[in-house]
Image (tube, rainbow, N blue to C red):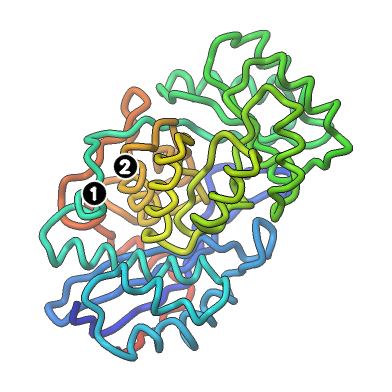
Amino acid sequence: MNIRNITLRHMSMPLLKPFTTSFGTLKDREFIVVEVTDAEGRSGWGESVAFVEPSYNEETLKGNWHLLEKFLIPLLSAEEIGHPAELAERFSPIRGNRMAKAALETACWDLYAKQQGRSLASVIGAAKTSIEVGVSIGIQASLEQLLEMIEQRLQAGYKRMKIKIMPGWDVDIVDGVRQKYPDIPLMVDANSAYTLADVDHLRRLDDYQLMMIEQPLAHDDIVDHCELQRQLHTPICLDESIHSADDARKAIELGSCQIINIKTGRVGGLTEAIKLHNLCMERKIPVWCGGMFESGIGRAHNIALSALSNFTLPGDTAASSNYWEEDIVDPAVIVRDGRIDVPEGPGIGYIVNPERLAKYTLHCEVFEV
């Protein structure tokens, strides 16, 4: 692939509105942008989705930067690579740290697709020309504010609503939503806020025809989810618990879930995400693509991944305008009637805007390969 240098940028972009989940409120999104440049001057772009603090999982932004600088970039530099799929094996001596691995690996996928003169979606074997998308709505100050936000998102054409829940903001809130919107596709996401002691309470959600309950129990659990799924009619979707295709295999065989959320950063890159997709397709488990407040770079990778055939449920890849006053890619990611067109241009199909990239960069370092 003739990679000559790798640039890491520590970015910070303010969210349009604070976003609250069961583990906290996010006001600004700090992240790492990875740029991989070849001998001809072409650039591939990737994004680390690790947060500043270890809240979603154990990884952090500073930890990712350290792993990239001290371990992953040197491993990539050790010898030439011919295809980005080789990086999963190249990085295998490093335990975990999947978000750091994914940031560099996805940049290489983008560069590889550009070198082939093909779209990233086509290179990974995706054939859809557009994808259905839903939207994720954080915990609000009141039910009225939540209903107002749902109405705005419905008017924008989103195909399903995901609302965050936690103890004290769950069954009564879902009941209020269903009273106003009895038929909309609706799901809830608990971000690991419950335990098996809450099974009777969670069983009340069966009355509301939800598409799924996402990650109700511990972030690293598949055993208790099996028991919970046995007692619920509503499908359980696993997110934080699934780090690999092998994790998914175990969860499916145990009966711990009926749906899986695939996030490229969480599983270590596109290569593993594709393996996970293929396994779920063989096992007839539907999948969808979750969001991590990505800029347009990470969002573009999600669009390409979601174009694979077993992504049969709307994902969280909402429009740029849902989160940012301005994105760092041109054009911005746009949703029309609940769908996003899959770009046909080379690589991710979006152009990184150098002025806005510089505007939101806090720190930048270049590493020769």
Of marks 1 and 2, which one's residue comes earlier in the chain? 1
Residue sitting nearer the eye, 27 or 201? 201
**Element marked by disc 2:** loop
Q: CA distance from mark 1 to mark 2?
A: 7 Å
Q: Residue furthest front?
A: 253
Report x, y in % for residue 220.
70, 55
| Label 1 close to label 2 by CB (< 8 Å) | yes
Residue type, label 2: Leu
- Residue 258: which disc? none
Which residue lies at the image location 66% right of the left edge and 35% below the top edge? Answer: 164
Q: Which residue is mark 2?
A: 308
| Quarter of image, res 203 | top right
Q: Which residue is mark 1?
A: 125
Residue sitting nearer the eye, 75 or 157? 75
Answer whether residue 350 is visible to the viewer in this image.
Answer: no
Report x, y in % for residue 230.
73, 30
User: In the rendered view of the protein, which quadrant contains the C terminus?
Assistant: bottom left
Report x, y in % for residue 138.
64, 37
In this rendering, the answer to whether 354 lies above or below 214 is below
**Element marked by disc 1:** loop
Which residue lies at the image location 21% right of the left edge and 67% below the top edge? Answer: 112
Q: In the image, 344: left or right of 90?
A: left
Which residue lies at the image location 85% right of the left edge and 34% below the top edge? Answer: 198
| Quarter of image, res 137 | top right
Which residue lies at the image location 19% right of the left edge and 77% below the top edge? Answer: 1
Density class for disc 1 (Cα within 10 Å; few <14, some 14-19, many ≥20) is some
Q: In the image, 358: left or right of 21?
A: left
Density class for disc 2 (Cα within 10 Å; few <14, some 14-19, many ≥20) is many
In this rendering, the answer to whether 109 lies above or below 293 is below
Residue type, label 1: Gly
Answer whether residue 219 is visible to the viewer in this image.
Answer: yes
Report x, y in % for residue 46.
37, 64
